[in-house]
Image (tube, helix red, strand yellow):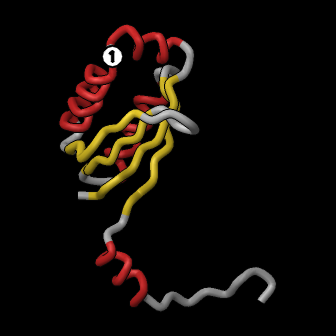
Amino acid sequence: MAKYLVIGNYVGEGLKGLLKEGGSSRAAAVKKMLESLGGTMECFYYAFGEYDVLCIYDLPDNVSAASFCLTINATGLVKIHTVVLMTPEQMDQVAKKSPTYRGPGQ
């Protein structure tokens, strides 16, 4: 499974819905959605400042993650951004690769 971080902000009526339903209800809805895609939720937090909500989750693949993000963003109630996360061991594998590349103008 691949691991992802989603960061987002509630927008307009989404803020009103959050105030009406409460935070636990929204976290449960996200967990249920992830499970419907074959994934799991590691953690879900609310924050104040630049972002309103942060969630780390696992999904089988990028197609499932894109479906998750597109479905949420399409509501117009929440605007999320996704970051693909990698383990230190995966980064070790990355460091061992030696791709051939020529930079622009080189």
In which quadrant of the rendered view does residue 55 lie? top left
Q: Quadrant of the C terminus?
A: bottom right
Residue at screen point 24% across, 52% down: 60
**Residue 103 in which image quadrant:** bottom right
Q: Nearer the viewer, residue 76 or 27?
A: 27
State the residue position of label 1.
22
Residue at position x 33%, y 22% from top? Answer: 23
Which quarter of the figure is the N terminus placed in?
bottom left
Q: Which residue is drawn at the image coordinates 45% and 53% (left, top)?
A: 83
Left/right of residue 84 with respect to residue 90 in the rendered view: right
Q: Quadrant of residue 72?
A: top left
Q: What residue type is labelled 1?
A: Gly
Across and down, in percent, residue 61 comes to 30, 54
Percent coordinates x, y for residue 85 in the rendering? 38, 60
Q: Where residue 30 sits: x, y (%)?
A: 29, 31
Extreme-front residue of the structure:
48
Image coordinates of residue 41 in percent, x first then y, are: 24, 42
Q: Is residue 75 above or below residue 40?
A: above
Q: Residue furthest right?
A: 105
> Is 1 situated above or below 42?
below
Q: Is residue 103 above or below residue 22?
A: below
Which secondary structure lies at badge 1?
A: loop
Q: Which of 53 and 35 is in front in this view?
A: 53
Few, some or many C-alpha atoms within 10 Å of disc 1 (few <14, some 14-19, many ≥20)? few
Q: In this view, does 57 lie to the left or right of 78?
A: left
Residue drawn at (47%, 21%), measured in percent from left and top? 75
